Amino acid sequence: MASAANWAGDAPSRYRARMHRALWVLAAGSALACSHHHQAPVRSAQLSPPEGELVQHTNRLWIELESTDDPQCERTPSERKLCFADVREAVGGALERTLWPSFPGVAVKRKGDDVAPGDYLLHVRVRLSSRAPDAAGPGWAAHVDGSWRLVRDGLPLASESFSSRSRGDFAYGRALGEGAGEVVDAVALHVARSVGRLPELRPAANRPLPAVATRAPTGGSLRVGAETTPLTKPTAARSPRGAR
C-alpha cells in the first residue's frame, strides 16, 4: 500500500518531467528547422534620381506594394531553403528615393492613408528568386520579375512588366541579399524614368508672380539698373611731350 501511495504521489512529478522533455524536444526541433535555411536581407543602395529631365506632376504619388511578400522564400533541388528578407522596405525606399523629383510628394501607402482626388497611385509587384551558376557567371545571381501600374482616380494611365538579373558571382545564401539589392535598384531607376516622363494631363494653372516692392538703393558707387559710378574722378589724359 505504501509503494502504491508513493507511486501515486510521484505521478505529478513524472508528468512534469515528461512535459519538460517534450517541450525541450519541440524547442530543439524548431531551432534545428530555423537553422536549416538561409536568410538574405535585401539592401538597397542610396540611389539618386535618374538623370535627365523629368515631368513635374501636380499631385502626390502613393506607392502600393501588392502581391509582394516579405520574406520571399524558395527551395532549390540541391540547396537549403533561401529567404529574401526586408523586401518591402527595400523596394519602397528605392522607389521613394528615385521618384521624388517628379511629384510634390512620394510615399509608400500604409494602412489608414487616404488617397486624395487627383493623387497618383502606383501599384508595384515584385518577386525575387535565385539563379544557379551558368554561362553568365561562376556564382549565384538574384533575379526579379514583376510589374507596375499607374492609376489616377481609378483610371489606368500606364503599365509595364519587368525583369532583371544581378551579377552571377555571389555565394548561395546571405550574400544573395546584395544581388537582390542590385536588381531592386535597377528596377526602381527604370520605373522612375518611365513614370517620371509621363505627361501631366492636369497641369496647374499659371498664376502671375506677386509684385516686388523696392526702396531707394544705398551705397556710394552702386546703382540698381545702371552702370557703376566711380568714386574718384578720372585722370585727364596727358599730351605727349613736345605737343602744342
Image (spheres, helix red, strand yellow):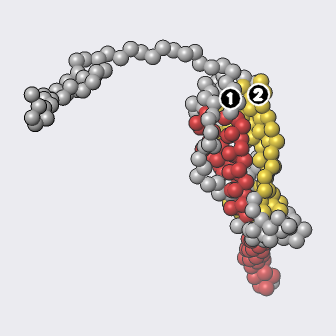
Front residue of this view, candidates 175 and 134:
134
> Left or right: 182 with respect to 127?
left
Q: From the viewer's perspective, tell me whether residue 59 is left or right of residue 243.
A: right
Q: Nearer the viewer, residue 155 or 135?
A: 135
Q: Secondary structure at mark 2?
A: strand
Query: What amino acid is labelled 2 in the image?
Result: Leu
Instruction: Give the quarter of the figure containing the C terminus.
Output: top left
Query: Which corner quadrant holds the N terminus?
Result: bottom right
Residue 109: quarter of image: top right
**Viewer can see residue 213:** yes
Residue at left offset 69%, top offset 21%? 201
Element at label 1:
strand
Is 67 displayed left or right of 85 in the figure?
A: right
Q: Position of residue 168 (x, y in %)?
A: 77, 65
Label 2 environment density (alpha carbons within 10 Å; few <14, some 14–19, many ≥20): few
Q: Residue 188: x percent and y percent?
A: 69, 46
Picture quadrant of residue 83 = bottom right
Q: Residue furthest right?
A: 77
- Which numbered tag is attached to residue 58? none
Sooner in the amino-acid sequence: mark 1 or mark 2: 1
In space, the residues marked 1 and 2 are separated at their CA atoms by 10 Å
From this view, report whether residue 175 is shown above or below residue 181: below
- Residue type marked 1: Tyr
* Residue bearing mark 2: 157
At horizontal 41% and vertical 15% (from top left) the residue drawn is 210
Give the residue at x 71% y 44%: 190
Dots 1 and 2: beta carbons under 8 Å?
A: yes
Residue at x 68%, y 51% (from the top left corner) = 185
Q: Which residue is mark 1?
A: 120
| Residue 8, x across and y down, in percent | 78, 77
